[in-house]
Image (tube, rainbow, N blue to C red):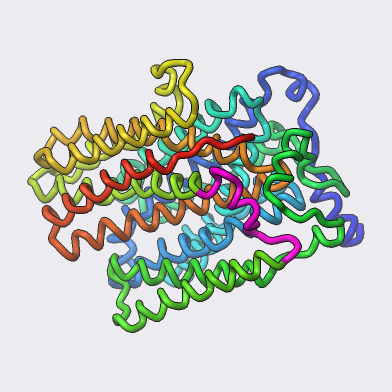
Amino acid sequence: MNATALASRLLTERPRPRGISGWRHAHWLAVGTVCLGAFLGQLDASVIALVFPALGRHFDAGFAAVEWVALAYLLVLVALLAPIGWLSDLIGRKTMYIGGFAVFGLSSLGAGFAGSLWALVGCRAVQAVGAAMMQANSVALVARGVPDHAMRRALGIQASAQGLGLALGPSLGGLLVEHASWRWVFWVNVPIAVFGILAGWYLLPRTRTAGTPAAAPGPRRRAAAGRTGARRTGASEDARFDLPGMLLLTGATTALLLALSTASGLPLPGWAVAALLLTSAALTVALVHQERRTARPILAPGLVNTPGVRSGLVVALIGYLLLFCPLVLGPVLLTGAGVSTAHAGLVVTLLPAAFAFAATVGAGLLPRGWSDVTRCRFGALLAAGGLLLFALLPASDAAAAPLLTAGYGLGLLLPANNALVMRAIPAQCSAVGGGMVNMARSLGTALGMALSVLGVHLAGAASGGRTVLFVLAAVAAAAALLTRPVRA
């Protein structure tokens, strides 16, 4: 078999077995498969901080060096989400998603066997490639694989899987490090990845066959595509990869996140931070110029300028900033007030637990006639109230109620917001749109961590943490004002 034939075989997605594809609830099996990737990604994101002390002891390295285990992953993930989403629209979302499990599993196996800190950092960078292949397609697979009336519920289930992974990470990581080894924090990903490959192969509907685009838009989506002002191109033009756009996006996000990472201890002088911020700004301007003149941009300006999409992406960024920042601040405030580390972890877990509950079934407690816009605004205001109470109440068990309130509000906000964004994005750009939603999530995560650590460094654990919480409450209220209705 020659290389062309092999590539065609690999890129030709296989249909599901007839017994599965013919079942009227088969789309929920696809949603469950996507939830595996969502769970795995967030489990890995929340578990890694637990191994920093063990890595420092094992490799005899300081915190600034060990931090690259997380930083390398985040840099690669944010840089690749949109480009991989673009590629997925061309070669098939199912193929890319299953491939993400394979890359993630193999690199996790390698990370567990790493003999040096920098070998581990390299494996984490490859892990991020696999995570990007899954995350850039997860929202698109859900949005295009379920009926319109079930989209919000499906996205809520996916968000709850993220919340579950986020909640289980700290406790699982602590158990593995204490009773086994830091290596098992990475090896535990391998069986989940194998199961994800099998589930994706049999349960995901195909999004592309040989010689066809990844998605064929229906009349409603074609009309939406017309509103974006996107250029229509021929097959040869569609296959042209926007390499300058990818490089500019990678440079801009890398420079920004390197500058932000100084808040958590990366030893860079002030002039270097300023240079990184200026570089990020300059590359962003160049990226906008490049995307406006290229035939097949990875970040289509017409797509971003669709009514409601730009504000929806900002709200997605804010939502994950609000979710991750208290996860870093909570233990600092609680342990500073005399609460034990284990007990503080249990209290903080209430935030992602409430998020998962609200994203799955909590919206059913709201009036049936509420639109996604109303749900977004109500959720944002709930989150603002919870964070404000967290800032005002003593750092003790009294923090449980505010964290439950904030988590519940975010669990209402994010699925409804993501549903609004994905309904406004044309089908042929769905993976790019999903990649942009996930990139907003990753940037929100990075900003949340940087903001929390910066506040503590500047003003001390107690006063700095509470100041950040007041800021977060104001940002949550602003998210309610930013939410806009979109026309599908």
Q: Position of residue 83 (x, y in %)?
A: 64, 59
Image point 12% across, 54% down: which residue? 463
Q: Position of residue 440 (x, y in %)?
A: 48, 52
- Vertical comparison of 356 with 277: above or below: above
Image point 43% across, 28% down: which residue? 374
Q: Is residue 396 visible?
A: yes
Residue 241 appears in which quarter of the rendering? Answer: bottom right
- Vertical comparison of 381 with 308: above or below: above
Residue 141 appears in which quarter of the rendering? Answer: top right
Magenta part of the chain: 294-310
Quadrant where the C terminus is found in the figure:
top right
Image point 69% across, 45% down: which residue? 227
Asked if the stretch drawn in magenta spans residue 275, the answer is no
- Vertical comparison of 373 with 268: above or below: above
Q: Is residue 361 left or right of residue 294?
A: left
Q: Position of residue 329 (x, y in %)?
A: 23, 50
Asked if the stretch drawn in magenta spans residue 295, the answer is yes
- Vertical comparison of 172 with 237: above or below: above
Q: Is residue 405 left or right of residue 277?
A: left
What kind of secondary structure does the magenta stretch mostly adopt? Answer: loop
Quadrant where the N terminus is found in the figure:
bottom right
Q: Is residue 455 left or right of residue 137?
A: left
The residue nearer to you, when weighing 178 against 344, is 344
Q: Is residue 98 visible?
A: no
Residue 454 appears in which quarter of the rendering? Answer: bottom left
Q: Position of residue 446 (x, y in %)?
A: 39, 57
Q: Across the whole image, how many numbered discs are drawn on residues?
A: 0
Image point 28% across, 72% down: which residue? 62
